[in-house]
Amino acid sequence: MPNFEAVIGLEVHAQMNTKSKMFCGCDNDAFGKPPNTTVCPICMGHPGTLPAPNKEAINKAAKASIAIGCEIQEDNHFDRKHYFYPDLPPGFQISQYDFPLSKAGEVKFNVVDDSGNKVGDQRICKITRLHMENDAGKLTHRGDKTLCDYNRAGTPLMEIVTEPDLRSAEEAVAFAQELRRILIAVNSSEADMFKGMMRFDASISIREKGAKELTPRSEIKNLNSFKSLEKALNYEFKRLCKLYEKEGKHLKNDITVGWVDDEEQTKMLRDKETAMDYRYFPEPDIPPLHFTKEDIKKLKYEIPALPSELKTKYEEMGLEDFEVRMLIDQPYSRSVFDAVYEKTDDIKRSRSIVLTQLAGIVKAEGDNFKKPDLDFIVEQLTELIADSRITKNQEKEFLSDIVIDGMTVKEIVESKGVRDVDESEIEELVNKAIKANPQAIESFKAGKEQALGAVVGWVMKESKGEADPAKVNDILKEKIDN
Ligand code: ZN
Ligand code: MN
């Protein structure tokens, strides 16, 4: 059997988190609202109404474009894409066709295993284009009836199209997850998968490894989760390989299929529509968009640190893959970590307290976890690290008192007490330490300030971490001076 590889491209639709819809003033947050309550004559496509493009949406799409490395097209415009379907009241979607908002970007990503460790080399998926359009309504099929809810009709969408640069279902998922992180980072989309805010269509062909020639592709529609994206691509890959085995190079299989989640298989939908069928033409009711170089420059300034930049920053600090991933995916933990590290300048303790212990509590609490006020938590964690009387074992207990019960370190110390190693004990240990570390003491006397660290460390170890290092330091220096 020949060795096949998949050639995969994605089309991603992401809803933008704007206040109002793409072309009217309707509330864009329809979640949990009764059907057909966030609609108006414009998004319902009544004759004689005029669409007005949403500036917030255009800015968000432009920022997303920059974040995925796309070039904003200074001149671009909206087009009408015609098709009839009950979820599309006007009979056309306002989209962008030959002059999209932006083109030619790329997203770097890594495939990771279940524990968040990188597998293989970094990969790049080129982005063909990003354009704006409006979402359609939502149809619910009940028996032989269909219910229409138009709350979603008119929600601003970004459609992001990739080059066929992905080589496996795993890569497609890893790319899609990275893209999701980027959209969230620039605040262009909530990208909440459960609410259907990010959806995928995938096209897949196969070829013998090393060959240039592709088999006809199939297109998989309506994938609403990373799991179904992965399962559907794996299913289609196997199906295409089997077909190829049977029919060889003459394989004719250029079809559109849908993924049926419950049955875990793809099913034929309809013949592939070509662009011609949509009768695209420039939207006559909306003037073309124009971005000046100044506009684009301004937008670039507003782009926050992107996941890839955060990744480089934290990797350079020596953090593990899983820690880096956590800081990228959890803005709250990131803010806490950054602030605590900045205040304490203690990378080891910041990591252990924020990325191990605090993360453990957050995970254990699950949905019950209420994020404490950022300033409060940073202040308390900084104090926890600074108070050297608090032992490692106590630390864990204290942390949960702070995070869950909202107590301050001061309050906890007052109510629970800390073991304070008294000075005579420290003096005794320091005497021993001086005898045990003659070389370090000599170096210190010769002017090497940092040599003392080893001696203090020795005392800390002997006291099982319970002595106050500041006190140890003072007593040690006093003894050496005398
Ligand atoms: Zn409306
Ligand atoms: Mn689309």
Image: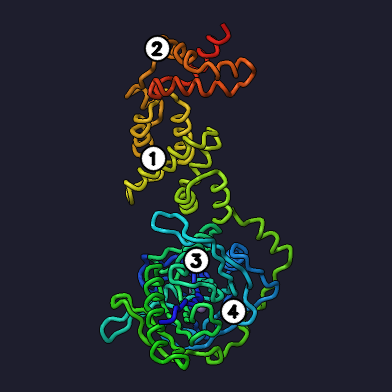
Q: Give the quarter of the image for residue 94.
A: bottom right
Q: Of the two numbered discs 2 and 3 on the same chain, state the one appearing first in sequence.
A: 3
Q: Of the two numbered discs 1 and 2 on the same chain, state the one appearing first in sequence.
A: 1
How far, Cα to Cα, is label 3 from label 4?
24 Å
Residue holding disc 2: 425
Total marks shown come to 4
Percent coordinates x, y for residue 197 in the rendering: 44, 68
Mark 4 element type: loop
Percent coordinates x, y for residue 181 in the rendering: 50, 60
Mark 2 element type: helix
Nearer the viewer's eye, disc 1 or disc 4?
1
Nearer the viewer's eye, disc 1 or disc 2?
2
Q: Give the quarter of the image for residue 380.
A: top left
Amino acid tagged 1: Gln
Amino acid tagged 4: Gln
Residue holding disc 4: 96
Q: Of the two numbered discs 1 and 3 on the same chain, state the one appearing first in sequence.
A: 3
Q: Residues within 10 Å of mark 1 (few under 14, many from 20)?
A: some
Please tell me whether residue 407 is drawn above or below residue 12 in the rendered image. above
Nearer the viewer's eye, disc 2 or disc 4?
2
